[in-house]
Image (tube, rainbow, N blue to C red):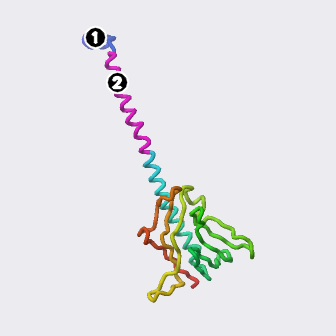
Amino acid sequence: MNVRRQKLNNRKGFSLTELLVAVLILSMVSAVVAGGIPVARDAYEKVTLSANAQVTLSTAISALRNELCAASEVNIDSNAVEYYSPSIQNYSKICIDGSDIKLYLFSQNEEGAPPVGRLLVSEKARDNQLHVTYESVGFKKKSDGSDDKSIIVFTGLKVLDNDNVTRSELEGGDTSVLEIRLIAS
């Protein structure tokens, strides 16, 4: 009982050396944690951008299919698809605006009026850092070499970031194709 009382009454604290060692250990742990935060943040941003790119590509594929599956009077000229859209009952055009590398849908509202453009994948449906593009578009070739006018083929459909780095693309890389069968043909 006496030993316990002596320990409770002992007013001896930590020595200066013990306090310096504790501060040194705490600062080393803080440095390691602080150095890991930017790495974790960068990893999070890469994963988020990749996921957003996948969603944007999926949305673009759905939008292209929805827009073109019922199209009629389809013409393909210089990587653009011109067609009659029964949903808006007007002629439309899907092309890449060369300055922005974005996918647009154009509609001719009145005869002779300039086309009104809108993003095929809307601003709300995609990350502002991402752009949808394709390398070429055409009709599927038959075995005899003629065009199969019932199937539109987009080659190299992919999502790029602001630095034009590919963030998502169809399976197959440069040889990837998206085929859309026209119902109206």
**Relative image position of residue 62 (x, y in whole percent):** 53, 69
Position above or below: 25 against 165: above
Give the magenta range.
14-40
Position above or below: 173 against 16: below
Q: Is residue 120 visible?
A: no
- Camera-side mark, 1 or 2: 2
Inspect the image, locate mark 2, and give the three-letter code of the amino acid beneath it. Ala
**Residue 5 picture quarter:** top left
Q: Can residue 80 be seen in this view?
A: yes
At mark 1, the secondary structure is helix
**Relative image position of residue 121 (x, y in whole percent):** 58, 64
Choose between 11 and 17: the one closer to the eye: 17
**Residue 8 picture quarter:** top left
Q: Main secondary structure of the magenta part?
A: helix
Number of marks in picture: 2
| Mark 1 lies on residue | 6
Inspect the image, locate mark 1, and give the three-letter code of the amino acid beneath it. Gln
- Please identify the quadrant where the C terminus is shown: bottom right
**Relative image position of residue 129 (x, y in whole percent):** 54, 55
**Relative image position of residue 134 (x, y in whole percent):** 52, 69
Separation of residues labelled 1 and 2 (CA atoms): 26 Å
Write the residue at 24% across / 12% down: 3
Choose between 137 and 87: the one closer to the eye: 137
| Mark 2 lies on residue | 22
Write the residue at 68% across / 77% down: 90
Task: Left or right? Give the position of 157 relative to 28.
Answer: right
Mark 1 Cα shell of 10 Å, populated few (<14), some (14-19), many (≥20) = few
